[in-house]
Every structure is written in structure tokens, then in C-alpha cells.
Image: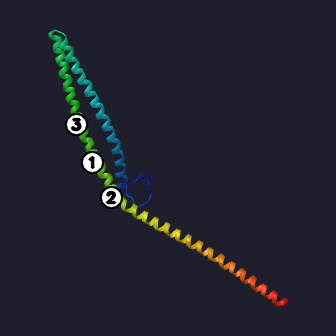
Amino acid sequence: MGTIDISTIDISNEDYSDDALKDCYNALTSAQSIKNVKEKSLRLEMENKRLTDQINELHTSAAGEQTSSEVERALKASVLRLKDEIRKRDTEKEKLTVEKEKLEAYTKRTLAKFQGKYLLALQECNAKLKEKRDKIEQLENRSAAQKRDEQLLSSTIYELGFAIMEQKLKERQG
């Protein structure tokens, strides 16, 4: 099934229902929501990487130094907190991914529904337009041929009249 350009459809026609317009609007807004979900997913991935890097730095610095038990406990608590935050962000990322997939599926269904409803009407209109253009071209060709015939007939009548006048003049003179 081909795609259609929504801007070429005349929605002032009474045959279009409000539901179709709502479906079209929902499809367009769904595309914007998909973009927002993708952006949020990328931000979460960057934050996840930053937090993972912080954990690695804490592990590295903790291994390099000999710290007291209080500092060690604080680091372990910080590591656990960061790991928990990473798990929460991963969960949120997975939810957003599922939402994005659902939104994409909905958008595809809505677009297919819209195209299914109006593609046939568009094809019929294009066929009628082609018929009208062909008819106009036929009429133009017929008009040009008729004009040419009129000119030939006018020229022939002129020449015939001229020939008759010459003959009458010759009869008067001779």
C-alpha cells in the first residue's frame, strides 16, 4: 500500500468524518511522542553511563587508598545507592521502550486505517481527473480541426467568388 501526502487531501468535503480527522491527528501526535520517548531513552542511557563511571571511579579510588572503616562503609553505601539508581533507571528505560513500541504499533495501525479508507477515494478522483483532462484535450483538438476546416472553407468560398466575378467581367468585356 503506497503512502499519501495528507496535505493534498481536501478535508472540507462532507464525506470525511471527524473520526478520520481525529485518527490522522493522533497519528501525527504519536510521531512526536515517539521522538520524545527516544530522546528520554538516550538521556537515561547517558545518565546510566555516567553513574556507572562514578561507581568504577569509587572502586578504583577505594582500592588505591587505604581508608578507614567509616570511609569504606560510606563508599559501600554510595555504591549500593548508585547501583539501585542504575536499576531504577534501567527499569524506566525498559518501560519507555515498551511504550515506544506500543506507540509505533498504534501509529502504524492508524495510518493503515486512514490509508485504507481514503486511498480508494483518491484513486477514483485521480481517474476522474484523467478522464476530464482527456476530454478537454479531445475538445481542443476538435476545435483546432474545426477552425482549420472553417478557414479552408472560407478560403475556398473566397476563391470561388473571385473566380465567378472574373468570369462575369470577362463575359461583359467579351
The numbered mark at residue 116 is 2
Q: Is residue 149 left or right of residue 75?
A: right
Check the image and name the residue furthest to the left. 69
* Percent coordinates x, y for residue 33 in the rendering: 33, 41
| Vertical order, 94 against 7 (above or below) | above
The numbered mark at residue 94 is 3
* Percent coordinates x, y for residue 160 in the rendering: 72, 83
- Residue position marked by numbered label 1 in the rendering: 105
Q: Which amino acid is tagged 2?
A: Gly
Check whether the beta carbons of the residues at disc 3 and disc 1 lie within 8 A of each other: no
* Percent coordinates x, y for residue 30 in the rendering: 33, 45
Decide which of 86, 167 is in the foreground and name it. 167
- Specify the quadrant of the image occupied by residue 172: bottom right
Q: How many residues crowd mark 3 within 10 Å: few (<14), some (14–19), many (20+)?
A: few
Check whether the beta carbons of the residues at disc 2 and disc 1 lie within 8 A of each other: no
Decide which of 136, 43 is in the foreground and name it. 136
- The numbered mark, 2 or 3, whose residue comes first in the sequence reads 3
Mark-to-mark CA distance, 2 and 1 = 16 Å
Q: Residue at x 81, y 88 (%)?
A: 170
Q: Which amino acid is tagged 3?
A: Glu
